[in-house]
Amino acid sequence: MNVRLVAGLLLLLTSHRLFAQEPSGRLDLDLVAALPHEYLVVARVAFDKVNATCPHDYATLRLGNGGLLHQRVMVQSASMPTRWQGFGTIDDYTYRSSIATADCRRELTVRLQVRELDGSWRSLLVAPERRPGLSAAERSEMTQRSLEEFRARPRPEPEVAARQQEARRALTSMGSLAQGVLVKFSDGTPFENAPPTCADGYGTVVTEQDGVTLLFTTKLADALNRFIMERVDPSDEESRIYFTRGDCRLELTIGAATQYDGRWVARTIPAYVPPRRPMFDPGKLDSPPAGVRRSN
């Protein structure tokens, strides 16, 4: 049998079950939260420089509730127009979204994984109603079942319902606070049988010309942003950021491409070169509260 065919079959059979790879970067945000003041954790994946005009985008990330919630806004702008494609499934385990200009594209893919007894990580199936491995009839049945469960949920108390209605009216009457806002997008990645405890938190993702930056603030309430972040680059063209808590982790894969001769060509990720000296003195991380100037 063809060697490539055998390798492809093995990859297909094991693609949802992975053993740990050695990370090139790691940070425990629960440990960083021990600092006396809030701290902004910044992680960045850089790409090689290109002449093409690449998309610029800002979005919030909500990790938790069995997946990832990606929220972004489109505003009136004179910058290069972009095309946004929300998170769709590319197989039974993976969601992918992209944002692109005419000749430059950034992609995000998401998986949710749980740790097995042997230490390997198993990818969970996407929600049944969005799973491409099921037939259209099966997905339709699952969608109908989800709608029925949604309709059967307990109704809020009258006071709560009135407050919610008031909140909806407030959102439609913001006045000049919404100047230039065209439309808001909210896109989720639900998974089947997601564990109740996993990476839980809020952050920001910034896409710019030569990279993607993730920002998370520590010391949030309710144990938010208390996960471990790790980076693994499976190739010169992709970088994976893992958000791990306990035996559950969310995998975010970041990639980019440019148009060349009528086809998309992946951008490479330069090798990481550690700085010759730290960007900051760890002994001075105990920064004073906002508005208080440090004396020399």
Image: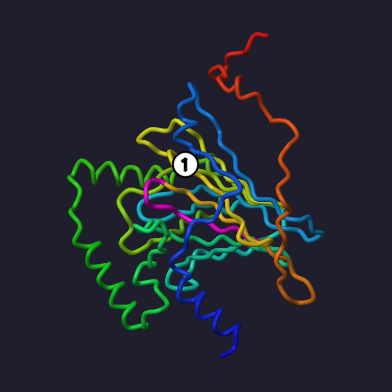
Residue at far bottom of view: 1
- The foreground one among 275 and 51 is 275
Q: Residue at x 39, y 42 (%)?
A: 170
Residue 253 percent across, percent down from the top left: 56, 59
Q: Position of residue 237 (x, y in %)?
A: 67, 62
Query: Is residue 248 located in the magenta-colored stretch of the structure?
Result: yes
Give the image location of residue 157, x and y in percent.
17, 45
Q: Residue at x 57, y 48 (%)?
A: 205
Q: Position of residue 73 (x, y in %)?
A: 55, 52
Name the quarter where the C terminus is drawn. top right
Q: Is residue 185 left or right of residue 210?
A: left
Residue 55 forms part of the magenta stretch: no
Dot 1 falls on a residue whose secondary structure is loop
Please, what is the three-letter code of the amino acid marked with disc 1? Met
Q: Quadrant of residue 108?
A: bottom right
Image height of 73 relative to 18, above or below: above
Q: Is residue 143 above or below residue 84?
A: below
Closer-to-camera residue (27/209): 27
- At horizontal 55% and vertical 79% (from top left) the residue drawn is 8
The answer to whether residue 55 is left or right of residue 248 is: right
Locate residue 279 relative to residue 171 in the image: left or right. Answer: right
Stretch in magenta: 245-255
Residue beneath label 1, please?
A: 174
